[in-house]
Image (cartoon, helix red, strand yellow):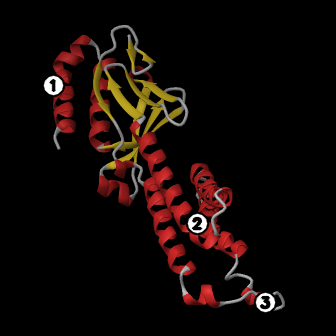
Amino acid sequence: MRLMGVLMLPGEREVVRLRPTTLSNPWVHVGALGLGLWALVLQALFSSRSWLETKVVWWQPWTWFVANDLAAHFWAATAPVGVGLALGLLAHKRLGLWLAVGSAIGASLVTLLLAIPAAQGLPVSVAAMAVLVLVFAELRRRSQHLAVTTLRLVAWQEFPRRREWTARHADLVDLELRQGALARGLGTGTLVAVQGDGSRTLFCNVARASRVRTLAEALVRQATATPYLRESQDLDRQVADALAALQRR
């Protein structure tokens, strides 16, 4: 039996399956919105009087950055490339770096290939890149799943490439929850499954993270308990209560 492409273990049963909400990992969506706003800024810049009426004088360097196609491409790339470099170099977010730089290059290439004057074509091209990034973000979010089963935590992602994370309840010694102030307010976070050999498996962008952790901890106790402990501690009831709490809105 398979769980969306993940092979199920003998006797394993899915308890609940979750998909990240937009607020679980909003940064690519926010990046798409930022590109859209940048397109509006470019439209305002390229239609302004200072841009249209300034003539390039090559021995006056301050005029090089207005009123010509090369300058328009430069300004269109400034914000995306700057943000991308900051994400890649400072925040170590390579996806943000590639999306930002790719959007800037894509907008310029579309304008050049269609032979549209840069001041007219770049705002539209940047807006088109914003739509593409938004579509990418949503496809990526919809391809991500976290399943809590009777034996494991299983997470997988289908787009843009197949990835999978698993942690067996019987191997866990701790289940940590990482949340910043913003994530705590949104109810999202990262679950860190600490295993007996010291290895850690990260389950990122978990919606209703604290409730998922409570359910997973109850299932770990249930999976590792003897029949006597399961009955004396009423572990089945603990799992049922944790599941009911998770499913409440």
CA gap between label 3 and label 1 equals 80 Å
Q: What residue type is labelled 3?
A: Val
Question: Disc 2 on helix, strand or loop?
Answer: helix
Q: Nearer the viewer, residue 94 or 213?
A: 94
Dot 1 and dot 2 residues touching (CB under 8 Å) = no
Residue 15 percent coordinates (x, y): 27, 24
What residue did someone put label 2 on? 121
On the picture, is 95 further left or further right than 148?
right
Does label 2 or label 3 sit earlier along the sequence? 3
Which mark sits nearer the N-terminus, 3 or 1? 3
Residue in the image at 20% along x and 31% along y: 243
Q: Nearer the viewer, mark 3 or mark 1?
A: 3
Q: From this viewpoint, which residue is outermost toward the top?
A: 10
Foreground mark, 1 or 2, reads 2
Query: Which of the image's four quarters has the C terminus?
Result: top left
Which residue in the structure is indicated by mark 1? 237
- Residue type highlighted by circle 2: Gly
Q: Give the residue number, with chain letter if any, for mark 3.
A: 57
The amino acid pointed to by label 1 is Arg
